[in-house]
Image (tube, coloured by chain):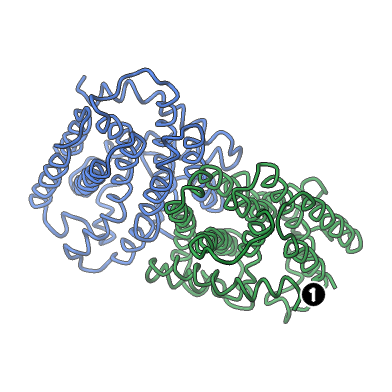
Chain colours: A green, B blue
């Protein structure tokens, strides 16, 4: 097992339990739809980044021991995953990308209908903020950072973040993409939440503003690399590995990195983004090994 | 001018400015759609309740003076209105009530399309939480209550609140409504946010837990009365006064109070809910006159 696999093996059970506990109170049909959407085989990259960023921001690295503190961190990380899940549900809606498959399974609205899927997305946004409030309620340290935590997550999701990016992406369909427009779309649509996921880990750890900024920049660069590799896999990937149709982006004339920069150019850019991400880690006081491994993990998907 | 009109005349300009400032950064098309939805002649009942509840929770009543504090309160109140606006946009969507008119104007998705309307609703949820974080950032007093403020608002909106209530309402269409089911729908769909609007005012004022609870109960009862009167107006109202089609609820076999309790029975229940709301105000240390006037305002719409 490499360092990332080891980290996932240790942390994923606690994270999954936190996710389950947050969506359970929703009850049917919202809870069932949420459980379906969240359970469909996600890799939990964003919340695991929140946890790894937290540990990288702690002087000398995280030492297992304070269970309450870890539970709060799981909860904040789970909030990030629920925001991501909401975005997938809404992204697939008939009025958005109108996708039938996600991770090899029918999309949430295909199973539960558009009404329930739309409402589930909205409810998950609320569950995420409820989770942040709950985590802060039992910790004065965390409460002190809650204004920034709430702002950082809301800004990453809203009009200048993911939601705005989804619209830019839809507007760009069918038009000749350019490099600047492409980056604007993916900074907002993909990188903003991954950046926030990392910054939140730092904020929960009580990191310095510089460390939080470095984690945010690491996340933004990693997010861009992630999107580049995702675009590459849409061109070069095997449908049975991907769990969704490939070639879809091209068929829709979506703004993708290979369409703008070519396959080789995109690989090169992904490596550069990965290097920029690694550069941000230099000054962090804790254990950076998982964050370093995450960059390798993302880039290794290219091959 | 009665006490409510006087309060509205003094407070509405600051509130409107706060709302504008929050949605401006969204830019087109989200900002345009949000401005359209929020500008369409709303009475701002919920945010004005937040402000009135705040003043009712302050010993001796609010004294004009601390502009920064009032600006923070306007921002929190504006967040409540943006959540309400999001709910109206999503409630009108083709996958929800599929309404063409709202307050006498075409609904947001009829003007901006379903894609932009869905995204605008999601973005407004985020703007609301961003506003709460921003308000708390400059006030240690407010920051101390932010965990509860975030939890209270998120719970009112999510699966056990407004979003869940919308689904219950849709599920109940066409079925013979019963009194318990009807109350469950409207407690979640309408009363939860009005209750939270009032509780948030108390939390911003740093009120005691008892006072916050009383304000929340006042809001819940007022919200139920409000819904009863709304249902009555759908049966008895004049379309030109209502700004929307009347008789719609009946035509859809929606679960309404007159359908369950009759017109006279609903009027009686609305008066009882109004009385219960007033009972909650007894122990509040500040100026209750606007909250009292709000009950009259809601009940007077019956006639």
Which residue appears at 8% of the width and 49% of the height?
A: B264
* Quarter assignment of residue B62: top left
Q: Is residue B264 visible?
A: yes
- Extreme-right residue of the structure: A264
Residue A39: percent from left, percent from top: 54, 74
**From the viewer's perspective, is residue B138 above or below residue B227?**
above
Q: Nearer the viewer, residue B147 or A36?
A: B147
- Extreme-bottom residue of the structure: A240
Residue B139: percent from left, percent from top: 46, 32
Quarter of the picture containing the N terminus of chain A is bottom right
**From the viewer's perspective, is residue B281 above or below residue B152?**
above
Which residue appears at 67% of the width and 71% of the height?
A: A7
Residue carrying label 1: A237
Quarter of the picture containing the C terminus of chain A is bottom right
* Quarter assignment of residue A127: bottom left
Which residue appears at 24% of the width and 69% of the height?
A: B175
> Is A298 situated left or right of B215 in this image?
right
Q: Secondary structure at mark 1?
A: loop
Residue A301: percent from left, percent from top: 79, 71
């Amino acid at each position: 097992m490499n360092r990332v696999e080891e980290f996932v093996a240790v942390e994923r059970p606690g994270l999954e339990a936190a996710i389950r506990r947050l969506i359970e109170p929703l009850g049917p049909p919202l809870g069932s739809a949420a459980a379906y959407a969240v359970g469909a085989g996600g890799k939990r990259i964003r919340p695991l980044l929140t946890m790894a960023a937290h540990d990288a921001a702690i002087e000398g690295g995280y030492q297992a021991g304070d269970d309450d503190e870890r539970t709060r961190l799981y909860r904040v990380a789970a909030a990030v995953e629920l925001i991501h899940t909401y975005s997938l549900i809404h992204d697939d809606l008939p009025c958005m990308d109108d996708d039938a498959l996600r991770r090899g399974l029918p999309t949430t609205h295909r199973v539960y209908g558009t009404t329930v899927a739309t409402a589930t997305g909205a409810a998950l946004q609320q569950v995420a903020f409820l989770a942040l409030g709950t985590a802060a309620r039992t910790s004065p340290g965390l409460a002190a950072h809650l204004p920034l935590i709430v702002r950082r997550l809301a800004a990453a999701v809203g009009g200048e973040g993911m939601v705005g990016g989804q619209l830019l992406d839809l507007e760009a369909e069918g038009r000749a993409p350019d490099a600047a427009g492409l980056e604007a779309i993916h900074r907002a649509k993909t990188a903003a939440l991954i950046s926030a996921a990392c910054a939140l880990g730092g904020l929960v750890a009580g990191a310095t503003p510089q460390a939080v900024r470095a984690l945010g920049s690491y996340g933004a660069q990693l997010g861009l690399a992630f999107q580049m590799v995702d675009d590459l896999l849409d061109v070069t990937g095997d449908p049975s590995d991907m769990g969704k149709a490939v070639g879809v982006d091209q068929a829709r004339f979506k703004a993708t990195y290979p369409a703008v920069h070519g396959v080789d150019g995109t690989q090169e850019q992904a490596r550069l983004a990965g290097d920029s991400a690694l550069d941000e880690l230099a000054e962090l006081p804790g254990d950076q090994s998982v964050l370093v491994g995450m960059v390798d993990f993302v880039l290794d998907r290219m091959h």
